[in-house]
Amino acid sequence: GNSVTQMEGPVTLSEEAFLTINCTYTATGYPSLFWYVQYPGEGLQLLLKATKADDKGSNKGFEATYRKETTSFHLEKGSVQVSDSAVYFCALSPLGGYQKVTFGIGTKLQVIP
Amino acid sequence: DTGVSQNPRHKITKRGQNVTFRCDPISEHNRLYWYRQTLGQGPEFLTYFQNEAQLEKSRLLSDRFSAERPKGSFSTLEIQRTEQGDSAMYLCASSRGGGRAAYEQYFGPGTRLTVT
């Protein structure tokens, strides 16, 4: 079956530090890949997505590249802010008539001033 | 576009009682999903509707769980004879649908269930 493995947190960084959250996946075919973010007290929001190999998703300074050869979709940001503190979920959905999303465990990021 | 709404936001119930949650999707979305999220875990897929048809149910959805989406609009998730292990956040999401494209799922704020 499909699965997503992401690094466990919490991750604590100082403001303006570089962020990497690792994510690898197992799936047949060519799934679509996502990063969702959950800010404290709020619902899940889509942060970025990539639908085919070598695509780069980007939003709000975050980036992730769909690497088919390493089955990875690592999330990066060059300079984090306190407002980026949240839980980040890597996820995939299989290519098909609908998108049942399989989520990773989530990585809590805390950015300190 | 008012987003996906869920009611109630919190529910505390005693073991053995029945509970029902409601989800109102974004109005033009024909796909609706239910997920369950326990503490420290990512959301797990429960079931999916295309319009009023329930097209897939996870093995996580035991016989005590039932979901409906009458008329393809709002959806309800009922849990009968609740158990402490049912304590979790129940998330609803909706999306457009059609073909093989990966449409974004919009999530509601969730209903937190506590079974005492």
Image: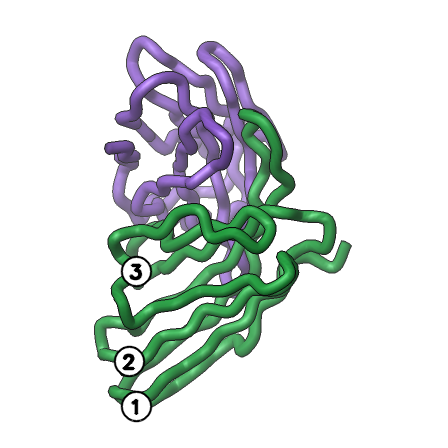
Chain colours: A purple, B green
Q: Which mark is residue B82?
A: 2
**Image spot of residue B69 (x, y percent):** 55, 62
Say what amino acid the circle numbered 3 marks: Leu
C-beta proximity under 8 Å, tags 1 and 2:
yes
Which residue is at 45% across, 12% downward? A53
Q: Quadrant of residue B6?
A: bottom right
- Residue extending farthest to the right is B1
Front one among B92 and A77: B92
Q: Is residue B94 above or below residue A51?
A: below
Tell me the CA gap for discs 2 and 3.
Answer: 13 Å
Question: With respect to residue A40, does B20 lie above or below?
Answer: below
Q: Amino acid at mark 1?
A: Lys
Q: Which residue is mark 1?
A: B14
| Residue type highlighted by circle 2 | Thr
Q: Where is residue A20 drawn, in percent x and y?
A: 39, 30
Image x and y of residue B110, in percent: 50, 65
CA distance separating discs 3 and 1? 20 Å
Percent of width and height locating residue B20: 46, 78
Q: As drawn, is A113 to the left or to the right of B103?
A: left
**Quarter of the image where the N terminus of chain B is located:** bottom right
Q: Is residue A75 left or right of residue A48?
A: left
Any part of residue B89 in sight: yes
Identified at 43% across, 18% down, the residue is: A66
Q: Which residue is mark 3?
A: B61
Q: Earlier in the sequence, mark 1 or mark 2?
A: 1
- Chain letter for the residue marked with disc 2 in the picture: B
Where's the C terminus of chain B, which quadrant?
A: bottom left
Tell which subunit mark 3 falls on: B
- Do discs 2 and 3 belong to a common subunit? yes
> Which one is closest to the eye, mark 1 or mark 2?
2
Mark 3 or 1: the one toward you: 3
